[in-house]
Amino acid sequence: MTLPPDVRVAWREVPPGLVRREVSRSLLAELLPGADVVSRCSACGGEHGRVRVTGVEATASVSYAEGWAVVATSRSAGSVGVDAVPAEATGLDNVLPGADARTWARVEAVLKADGRGLSVDPARVRIERRADDTWVGRVDDGAPYDGYDVVGPPDVVVAVAVSPGACAAR
């Protein structure tokens, strides 16, 4: 699936003994030279919150799966969300009835783009397929996000959701 021109997705394996956050920050530095990246949790102040970019006009999102760090960036979208899920993930049906890896990746990408993440019940996300193999997702009370199923690391399903403005260049 072809992403909008300014949306970039990259991944890198997390070597044993290396903190996965260091790998994702390295990828973001390569994709967004000059950017400062912070991820403070709004509840506790820890380094595990939503990724925010300063120093350049861009948005970013990060996900981790099966020893991989996956990032997505955009220089025009108001927001971007990426999620990576092991292709053979189990137990997703316990969190979201009927969910497989592809469904879960799409839902969480939308929740990340929306900015509320898992503070919103995943069952509130609606995904609709389009004729061109893209999809649109939205939290039932929120804005729509254009969605893309993208190639990722081996045996990992990756989905990206972006604000519709990023798709104007298609």
Image (tube, helix red, strand yellow):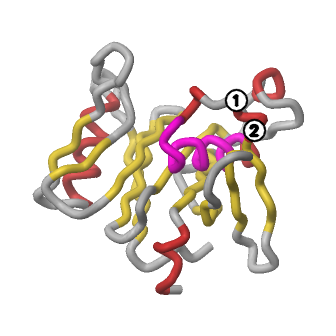
Q: CA distance from mark 1 to mark 2?
A: 6 Å
Residue 56 in view in this figure: yes
Residue 150 location, quadrant: bottom right
Discs 1, 2 touching: Cβ within 8 Å: yes
Q: Residue most toward the right?
A: 98
Q: Where is residue 121 drawn, in percent x and y?
A: 70, 29
Q: Residue most toward the front?
A: 141
Q: Residue most toward the top?
A: 44
Q: Where is residue 44 drawn, in percent x and y?
A: 33, 13
Q: Which mark is residue 121?
A: 1
Quick one: SS at disc 1? loop
- In this picture, residue 122 sits left or right of residue 28: right
> The residue under label 1 is which amino acid type?
Asp
- In this picture, residue 132 sits left or right of residue 70: right
**Magenta stretch, overall SS:** helix
Tell which of 18 and 106 is nearer to you.
106
Tell which of 102 and 117 is nearer to you.
117
> The residue under label 2 is which amino acid type?
Arg
Q: Which mark is residue 124?
A: 2
Residue 82 in view in this figure: no
| Magenta-tinted stretch | 104-116
**Mark 1 residue crowding within 10 angstroms, few (<14) / some (14–19) / many (20+):** few
Residue 1 location, quadrant: bottom right
- Relative to 6, residue 157 above or below: above
- Relative to 129, residue 17 above or below: above
Q: Is residue 102 magenta?
A: no
- Relative to 115, residue 79 above or below: below
* Picture residue at 47% right of the left edge, 86% below the top: 169
* Picture residue at 78% right of the left edge, 72% below the top: 130
- In this picture, residue 72 sits left or right of residue 140: left
- Relative to 161, residue 21 above or below: above
